[in-house]
Image (cartoon, helix red, strand yellow):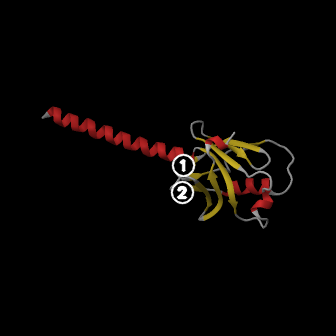
Amino acid sequence: MKNLISALVILSLTMMSCDSTKSISKANNTLDGTWQLNYITGPRIAFEGLYPDKKPTIVFDLKENRVSGNNSCNQYFGALLLDGNKINFKDAKMGMTMMACQGSGEPTYMKTLEKIDSYSISEDGKTLSFIAGTIEMMRFEKVAKEDHN
C-alpha cells in the first residue's frame, strides 16, 4: 500500500512539473525573438510615410534579459523590464547608435515606446501589441528566424 501511495505521489509531482514547465516555456517562447512593426498610433503621417525604407524591429532576449532593435535608422538596446504582461521601456536605460536620420519615424517610434506599460500576444503567437493604459499604441508581427539576419 505504501508503495502504491508513493508511486502515485511521484507520478502526480512529475505531471505537475511537466505542466508548469510547458506554461513557462510557451510564455517565454512567444515573446522571445524578433518582431517587426506594422502599426503605430498617433502620427498624422501614414505608416509607409514614416518608414518608407525600413520598418522598425524589436528583439527580445529573455535569457539575457535584454531588448534591442532598429528604430528604422539607428540600433537601440537596453534592459528588459518585465513583470507578467507589464513592460517598462522608460526605465530600461536605452542606448542608441547616433546616425543622422531623415523624417520623423525614429523619434515617433522611440517616444511611443516610452509610453508603453503592457503587452499582449495573439493566441497564434504571430502578433504582439504594445499598450498604454487601455489603448493599443503599436503592433508588431513575428519575424521568422530565417527572415532575420
Q: Residue furthest bottom?
A: 44
Does residue 127 appear left or right of residue 37 in this picture?
A: left
Residue at (62, 63) in percent of width and height: 136
- Residue 93: where, in percent of width, then height? 70, 44
- Residue 145: where, in percent of width, then height? 62, 41
Q: For residue 69, what is the image quadrant?
A: top right
SS category of the residue bearing label 2: loop
Crowd around label 1: few <14 · some 14–19 · many ≥20 (10 Å): few
- Per the image, the residue denoted by label 1 is 83
Image quadrant holding the C terminus, namely: top right
Q: For residue 18, what is the image quadrant?
A: top left
Q: Nearer the viewer, residue 20 or 125?
A: 125
Residue at (85, 50) in percent of width and height: 101
Rendered view: 65 above or below 48: above
- Per the image, the residue denoted by label 2 is 122
- Residue 82: where, in percent of width, then height? 57, 47
- Residue 65: where, in percent of width, then height? 60, 39
